[in-house]
Image: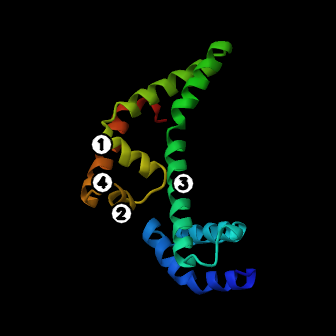
Amino acid sequence: MEKVEFTQGILAIQPDLHRFAYKLTADRDSANDLVQDCVLQALDNQEKFTYSKNLKGWMYTLMRNIFVNNYRRTVREMNIMDDNYSINQQYQIEDEDADRFEFTYDMKHLYRVIHSIPEEMKVPFQMFVAGFKYREIADKLGLPMGTVKSRLFFIRKRLKEELKDFSA
């Protein structure tokens, strides 16, 4: 398939790509970003597409894979607190500065509080902190939106009580 035909094919299915991206993300801006990432990746990998294949199906597969990879990256970034905690703790041992000790103590306390949250409540909380909206969390976890809202309310209330010493 020539580059011109390939590009015209992508332009022809762009409205379908936008609809599919919106179904995945449930957010217009995120959907636009996803379509842009998908088109860029398709143009970069045009040689991997053969004429006998279905362009729309290939583009949907690319988009779904990009979405899944972005979601997994977000989850990994949420779990980076574990890694930062151990790095900060090792750094603290080497540096006896009082401010660093206080920071490490605060991080340790924060770490304990967050990880004491029950798992069924922690996952929606992590997704909310990562920027997901209530509707997106409910859809991805298969929960009613009211359940998601109440879990987040109870987590906020618990964190507010347990972390009241951190407020200024």
Three-letter code for the amino acid on which mark 3 is drawn? Asn
- The residue tagged with tag 3: helix, strand or loop? helix
| CB atoms of marks 4 and 3 within 8 Å | no
Which residue is label 3 attached to?
69
Q: Is residue 96 visible?
A: no
Q: Relative to 41, say whether 142 is above or below.
A: above
Q: Is residue 24 visible?
A: yes
Mark nearer the N terminus (1 vs 4):
1
Which image quadrant: the N terminus?
Answer: bottom right
Question: Which residue is pictured at 47% across the width and 69% down the height?
Answer: 27
Mark nearer the N terminus (1 vs 3):
3
Which residue is label 4 attached to?
148
Three-letter code for the amino acid on which mark 2 is drawn? Arg
Q: Position of residue 77 (x, y in %)?
A: 54, 43
Cα distance, mark 4 to mark 2? 9 Å
Residue 23 occupies quadrant: bottom left
Residue 83 occupies quadrant: top right
Residue 143 occupies quadrant: bottom left
Mark nearer the N terminus (2 vs 3):
3
Which mark's residue is nearer the viewer, 1 or 3? 3
